[in-house]
């Protein structure tokens, strides 16, 4: 049983999930340094696969359980997960509510959701020119005056946009309030680039700081709790996976392991494990996102039905 250090009431295990886990660096630390089994979820197979590299670089022995799936339709049983967290993830959705409503659904009553380094809208901002890429040498070495001018007048520029990934930097404070409204307890902080100007999103102590934070924009982070009291029953992540195919029809069907990966107990769909990454998409989504794996799966199923050979 593990808790966040500065808050004895936040339970990590038995089921801890990172959404938008990318290369799984954070999941690796939780899995190895805290000894908590962590499931790393991302829609990018390549990102999840790169965890092999980072495991070697950081000299870690245990690998998080990696699931390639869609966070807006999490293949996880309702009311089952102890702790969900993410880092720089929610701004990749058109609306953060698409992800947070699913997070809320899968959390156990009393379970927690932590998120960090997400942006919120800069009201005092005009797009006049394109800035150098974030984390570029020019951007990092810019003087304070250039940084301030860029902050209020430059169009953000980063690698993700070039790869077709949504970079939503216009999520308003109201959008964030809407995304978090389902949670019972919320400790959410708006932090502007000026360190002293930060405020609570809900029930701010200083109206002036709230107005300044609203106008300037910045980062939003925080901890939320689903209503209820947590009951730790030591269940594992494998027991709470559900079939994405059945879930499209509002049925939460358990999965069982088989020689290919995982299989639905109700519709018999099979979900493959490739390079230790579990693919949990409905057939339509798998065909759209990963056509090569979809084709491989269908060939495998044909072979399996004829009993010719195991995968
Ligand atoms: Zn099914």
Image (spheres, rainbow, N blue to C red):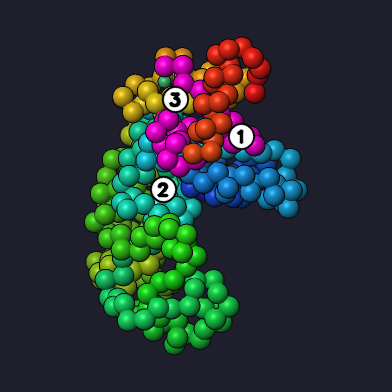
Circles 2 and 1: CB atoms closer than 8 Å:
no
Frontmost residue, 203 versus 67:
67
Magenta stretch containing residue 93, yes or no?
A: no
Q: Earlier in the sequence, mark 2 or mark 3?
A: 2
Frontmost residue, 109 versus 167:
167
Q: Earlier in the sequence, mark 1 or mark 3?
A: 3
Question: Which mark is nearer the camera, 2 or 3?
Answer: 3
Q: Earlier in the sequence, mark 2 or mark 1?
A: 2
Q: Ligand 1: give its quadrant.
A: top left
Q: Residue 242, labelled with which disc?
A: 3
**Residue in the image at 50% along x and 44% along y:** 42
Quarter that holds the C terminus: top right
Residue 209, can we see it? Answer: no
Give the secondary structure at mark 1: strand
Quadrant in the picture for residue 122? bottom left
Frontmost residue, 181 versus 125:
125
Give the secondary structure at mark 3: loop
Magenta residues, start to end: 267-290
Q: Residue 223, labelled with which disc?
A: 2
Frontmost residue, 123 versus 36:
123
**Residue in the image at 39% along x and 60% along y:** 167
């Amino acid at each position: 049983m593990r808790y966040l250090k500065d808050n004895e009431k936040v339970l990590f295990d038995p089921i801890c999930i990172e959404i938008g886990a990318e290369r799984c660096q954070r999941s690796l630390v939780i899995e190895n340094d805290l000894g908590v089994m962590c499931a790393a979820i991302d829609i990018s197979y390549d990102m999840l696969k790169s965890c092999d590299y980072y495991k070697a670089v950081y000299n870690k022995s245990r690998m998080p359980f990696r699931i390639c799936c869609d966070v807006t339709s999490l293949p996880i049983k309702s009311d089952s997960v102890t702790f969900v967290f993410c880092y720089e993830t929610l701004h990749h959705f058109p609306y953060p509510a698409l992800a947070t409503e699913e997070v809320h659904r899968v959390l156990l009553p009393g379970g927690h959701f932590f998120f960090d380094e997400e942006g919120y809208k800069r009201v005092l901002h005009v797009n006049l020119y394109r800035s150098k890429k974030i984390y570029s040498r020019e951007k990092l070495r810019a003087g304070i005056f250039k940084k301030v001018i860029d902050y209020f007048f430059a169009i953000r520029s980063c690698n993700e946009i070039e790869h077709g990934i949504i970079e939503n930097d216009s999520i308003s404070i109201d959008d964030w309030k809407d995304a978090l409204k389902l949670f019972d307890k919320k400790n959410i902080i708006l932090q502007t680039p000026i360190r002293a100007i930060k405020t609570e999103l809900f029930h701010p102590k200083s109206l002036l700081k709230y107005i300044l934070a609203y106008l300037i924009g910045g980062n939003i982070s925080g901890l939320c709790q689903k209503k209820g009291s947590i009951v730790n029953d030591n269940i594992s992540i494998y027991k709470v996976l559900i079939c994405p195919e059945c879930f499209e029809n509002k049925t939460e069907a358990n999965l069982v392991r088989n020689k290919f990966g995982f299989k639905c107990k109700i519709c018999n769909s099979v979900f493959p494990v490739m390079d230790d990454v579990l693919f949990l998409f409905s057939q339509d989504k798998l065909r759209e996102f990963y056509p090569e794996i979809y084709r491989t799966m269908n060939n495998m199923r044909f072979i399996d039905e004829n009993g010719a050979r195991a995968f």
